[in-house]
Image (spheres, rainbow, N blue to C red):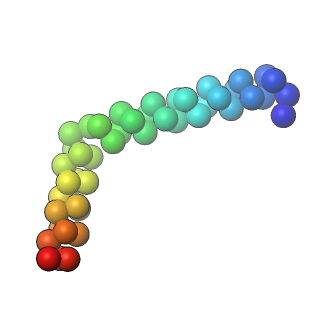
C-alpha cells in the first residue's frame, strides 16, 4: 500500500477503535457484560 492508503487505514482503525470503546464503556453494554460474566461464573461454582 502507498502512504496515502496507510493513512486512510490508520484513520479508519482509529475511528473503529473509538466506536468500540464508546460501546464497551456505555452503561447498557457494561451491565450486559457483567450479567453475562456473573452467569458464567455462577454456573462454574
Question: Residue at 20% across / 54% down in the picture?
Answer: 34
Question: Residue at 59% across / 34% down in the picture?
Answer: 13
Front-most of residues 16 and 44: 44
**Dividing the picture into quarters, in which one does residue 40 lie?**
bottom left
**Dividing the picture into quarters, in which one does residue 14 lie?**
top right
Q: Position of residue 26 (x, y in %)?
A: 26, 37
**28 lies left or right of 17:** left
Q: Is residue 22 above or below residue 31?
A: above
Question: Residue at 68% across / 32% down in the picture?
Answer: 9
Q: Position of residue 25 (x, y in %)?
A: 29, 37
**Dividing the picture into quarters, in which one does residue 33 lie?**
bottom left
**11 lies left or right of 25:** right
Q: Position of residue 3 (x, y in %)?
A: 81, 24
Q: Is residue 24 above or below residue 12?
A: below
Q: How many marks?
A: 0
Give the residue at the far right of this rendering: 2
Q: Quadrant of the C terminus?
A: bottom left
Q: Is residue 17 above or below residue 41?
A: above
Give the residue at the far front of this rendering: 45
Question: Residue at 19% across / 49% down in the picture?
Answer: 31
Q: Quadrant of the N terminus?
A: top right
Q: Is residue 12 above or below residue 39?
A: above
**15 lies left or right of 19:** right
Amino acid at each position: 500500500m502507498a502512504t496515502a492508503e496507510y493513512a486512510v487505514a490508520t484513520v479508519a482503525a482509529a475511528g473503529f477503535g473509538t466506536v468500540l470503546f464508546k460501546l464497551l464503556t456505555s452503561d447498557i453494554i457494561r451491565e450486559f457484560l457483567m450479567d453475562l460474566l456473573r452467569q458464567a461464573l455462577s454456573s462454574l461454582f
